[in-house]
Image (cartoon, helix red, strand yellow):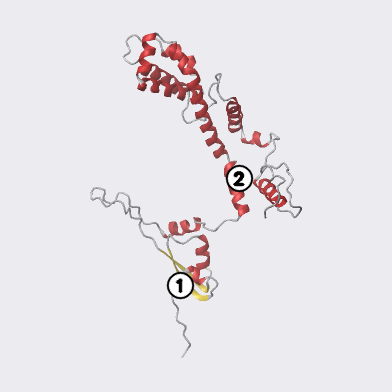
Amino acid sequence: MRLQNLGYAATIHRAQGATVDTTHAVIDTSVDRAGLYVAMTRGKRENRAYAVCEPVLDLGAEDAHMHSAGDHQAPTPTQMLAGVLARDTHQASATETLRQEYAAATSDERLEQLYRHGADLAARDFAAATLPAYIDALPRAYAHQLEADPDQYQALAAAWTEAATRGLDPRDQWDNATDTLDTANKPGAVIAHRIRHATGETTDSAALPTPPPVAPGCDTELTTWLAETHRTLTADPVARASSGGVSVTAEDFVASYLESRAAEHEPGPDTHPTTSSPWGPSPDSSPDLW
């Protein structure tokens, strides 16, 4: 009689390092890329994967009126395994994390997000610095009505800010927006509607906004940054690459950081001289407590 070895089920973690003739692996959504690799490399003769293709149930849809509105169809075996291969849960090293964070912080997508946020801030500052003077210049009856009705004022301020966000100077539209208000019950709402109409006709809401107009009292540093960043984001990629500007890569960033950290830990006297560093000043000359 041939010697027979009983085989028992084991987790992927338990099977790591083991070698068998044939592997039968049950793969579900809890498995990641590394686990699939381990499972499919245990068998010398054959490795088989059994994909668990179950529909995703909406556990919150218990109300009879909701039925199964939140449920998802069961994935195919190919979709199931593709999802496992795309799931990478390994712990990244410190240098790899630095590269990822630097790439995310310096990407065009991140820069555009910061630019749009800065444009919103600049547009609000512009509205706060310019709109009150134009409201005061209205006939007294209209100005008093705007001041007494917060809804009208907020509607006009929102339209004024939106125009500035789109790169349109609402001051240029003021004469047309305030023309023939004699029969208007809510002059502020009428002015706001006319400004929004002019804004929608002359600008594209999906396009990258131009920097808002400049007014006295606004943040000049933010204004300069917006102008420079807008030129960067709208420049041709080929022209940007050949412009000759200094480009710091992720590898340069990591190398500079590691070099700075290594210098801080070099053996020496009990005092730390103050040196200039892109990572901030070194500690002062107080005794080293460690």
Mark 2 packing: few (<14 Cα in 10 Å), some, or many (20+)? some
Percent position (x, y) of residue 161?
A: 46, 24
Q: Nearer the viewer, residue 91 or 55?
A: 91
Specify whether 191 is left or right of 63.
right
Label 1: which secondary element? loop
Specify whether 254 is left or right of 168.
right
Percent position (x, y) of residue 14?
A: 49, 71
Q: Label 2 sits on what residue type?
A: Tyr
Q: Residue at x 52, y 29 (%)?
A: 119
Q: Nearer the viewer, residue 208 or 81?
A: 208
Q: Return the mark for residue 169.
A: none
Q: Which residue is mark 1?
A: 10
Q: Which residue is mark 2?
A: 102
Label 2–label 1 contact, CB within 8 A: no
Q: Residue at x 65, y 34 (%)?
A: 240
Instruction: Find the distance from the CA under tag 2 to the CA under tag 1.
Output: 40 Å
Q: Nearer the viewer, residue 1 or 212?
A: 212
Q: Residue furthest right?
A: 269
